[in-house]
Amino acid sequence: MQTPGDNPHRRFNPLTGEWVLVSAHRSSRPWLGLEEPPTRLAIPQHDPDCYLCPGGVRVGGARNPVYEGTFVFANDFPALLPSSDSGGQDDQNRLFQWQPAQGTCRVLCYSPRHDLTLPELKLSEIEAVIQTWIDQIIDLSKIYTWVQIFDNKGEQMGASNPHPHGQIWASDFLPTEVKKEDSALRAYYAENNTALLDRYLEGELADGSRVVSQNDAWTVLVPFWAVWPFETLILPKERISQMPEMGAKRITDLAEILKITLSKYDRLFNVSFPYSMGWHGAPFINDSTEPWTLHAHIYPPLLRGATIRKFMVGYEMLAESQRDLTPEMAAEKLRALPSSYE
């Protein structure tokens, strides 16, 4: 596949219908802006004052059990509630509309260890995290249209507690980004009778320049339309639409590819790499799941090293997303790092 090279150009994201400006010639520009040294605190295996640790006391007085594996509890400060007022609009002006937003928010502690991030867990422990994701989706999808699994790692991505954890938000509506993907995937399937991300993966594997790592069941790549410097996309080699469709082999392979990928991030700048990661699969609505391919987005902010991150400001906020490092350059840097995780 012919790529545009290093000259300024725009790339199209078929999942959202949006464009990103690529300006690779700017990647060597001088930097006198903010640099944020990574936190180098010694983190204990257990913190008695941590409200996520086994036996820890949370806001409101609830005490965590002395859990030994994963642990899920209702978020003490949820963004969604099971009940909400009805929606409406200004009868005189349709520009003022609102609707109720109902749902539930849960927190998932990956491990009783306060000091181990997801890539530092054993493969069997990562498998347990994945199985917990599946169990939570099965439970919440009985009630809600959408279940969002996500993880904010590191202070630079807004993590409020160093104890390794993720979140699960379920809602009775399709969030904006998911709605964009759902519309794009269904439109492509209606026109081509095949799933967009399945066809896209075929092209990426044939090209190879943006592939970072792969195993029997999964491929990790820097998407052609990536916005964040070292953004990656995780795709199954054989299509599944929703996480509960995974069998034991796929779960094991996913644990491996997550450990490899997240370990590569940590080695890139020799720092515990911050990121936001989340899973998208077919929503739980009365419609076909065939257009959907389960996938994960990983959005890490670091740009030039452990102290300099990408800022989404100015042109990005007012015009469209822009990046200096081409996706091919980012993939090459990640691919060159060891794929071992020991």
Image: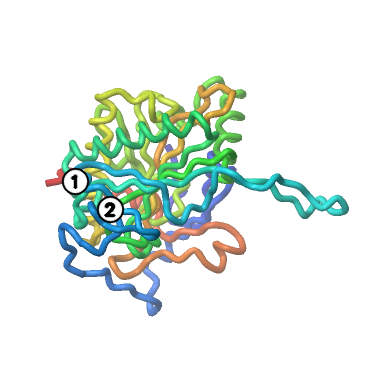
Sequence-first tag of 1 and 2: 1
Q: Does the image show residue 304?
A: yes
Residue 158 falls left or right of residue 194:
left
Circle 1 SS class: loop
Q: How far apart are marks 1 and 2 (CA)?
A: 10 Å
Q: Residue 83 carries which label?
A: none
Residue 69 falls left or right of residue 9:
left
Name the spot of residue 184 as percent of width and height, x first.
58, 35
In the displayed structure, 161 sits above or below 260; it is below
Residue 277 falls left or right of residue 214:
right
Residue at 46% x, 59% y: name it.
Answer: 323
Residue at 42% x, 54% y: name it.
Answer: 76
- Residues tagged 1 and 2 counted as in contact (Cβ below 8 A): yes
Residue 169 falls left or right of residue 96:
left
Task: Identify the amino acid type marked 1.
Answer: Leu
The residue indicated by pointer 1 is 121
Is the image coloured rainbow, by chain, by secondary structure, or in one colour? rainbow
Name the spot of residue 21 as percent of width and height, x first.
52, 56
Q: Does the image show residue 335?
A: no
Instruction: Report the number of discs.
Output: 2
Task: Identify the amino acid type marked 2.
Answer: Pro
Question: Between 80 and 147, which is closer to the camera in this rendering?
Answer: 80
The residue indicated by pointer 2 is 164
Residue at 61% x, 29% y: name it.
Answer: 187
Residue sitting farthest toward the bottom: 32
Name the spot of residue 336 as percent of width and height, x first.
22, 49
Q: How crowded is mark 1: few (under 14 residues within 10 Å), some or many (20 or more)?
A: some
Question: Between 106 and 148, which is closer to the camera in this rendering?
Answer: 106
Circle 2 SS class: loop
Residue sitting farthest toward the left: 342
Name the spot of residue 227 as percent of width and height, x first.
46, 53
Question: Between 289 and 227, which is closer to the camera in this rendering?
Answer: 289
